[in-house]
Amino acid sequence: MQRLAIMFRIKPGTEDKVRDLLANYAPPVRVTADGTRMLSTSVFMKDGIVVRMIEIEGDVPSLMAHIAQDPSIQYVESELDKYVVDEDRRSANTPEGAREFFLRMGMEHITTRLAPLEDVEA
């Protein structure tokens, strides 16, 4: 499993609109043609900064190309672009635009710590 995170800034006063948009859009198709799977997504927001975390199994470029072509993602990204600060805007409706955005706004993964299975109570 891989975890990816991207961050971007939104315009002041748009938090409620962004919260509603990111909480309520239709999820994309979660499996790509090559079998890459999007396992989960999480979104966090504070003080005008949005962080989206994605967990996947498979190929990151395949997922980016797949997501860029998904109608649900195209919709949410075009709506979201109205609220993103100019410096962080992107063209996420093509595989190239999505790739450029992920590279520019991607966060460095430092570590993930998981509890050993024996620590989990039944």
Image (cartoon, rainbow, N blue to C red):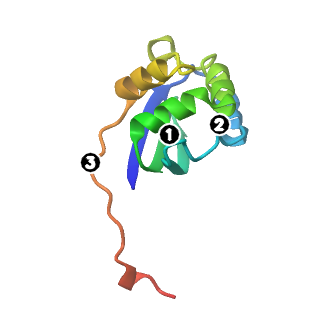
The type of residue carrying mark 1 is: Arg
The dot on residue 22 is 2
Question: Which residue in the protein does label 3 denote?
Answer: 110
Residue 82: horizontal and vertical position, in percent? Answer: 64, 16
3 or 2: tag closer to the N-terminus: 2
Residue at (54, 38) in percent of width and height: 45
Does residue 1 appear to the left or right of 72 in the view shown?
Answer: left
Viewer-closest of 1 and 20: 1
Q: Going 57% across and 20% down the picture, which residue do you hit?
A: 93
Q: Which mark is residue 52?
A: 1
At label 3, counting other C-alpha atoms closer than 10 Å, the crowd grade (few under 14, some 14-19, many 20 or more) is: few
Quote the CA–CA distance across marks 1 and 2: 10 Å
Whole-percent x, y for residue 14 in the image: 64, 24
Q: Compared to 103, does 54 lie above or below?
A: below
The residue under the point 42% across, 25% down is 99
Q: CA distance from mark 3 to mark 1?
A: 16 Å
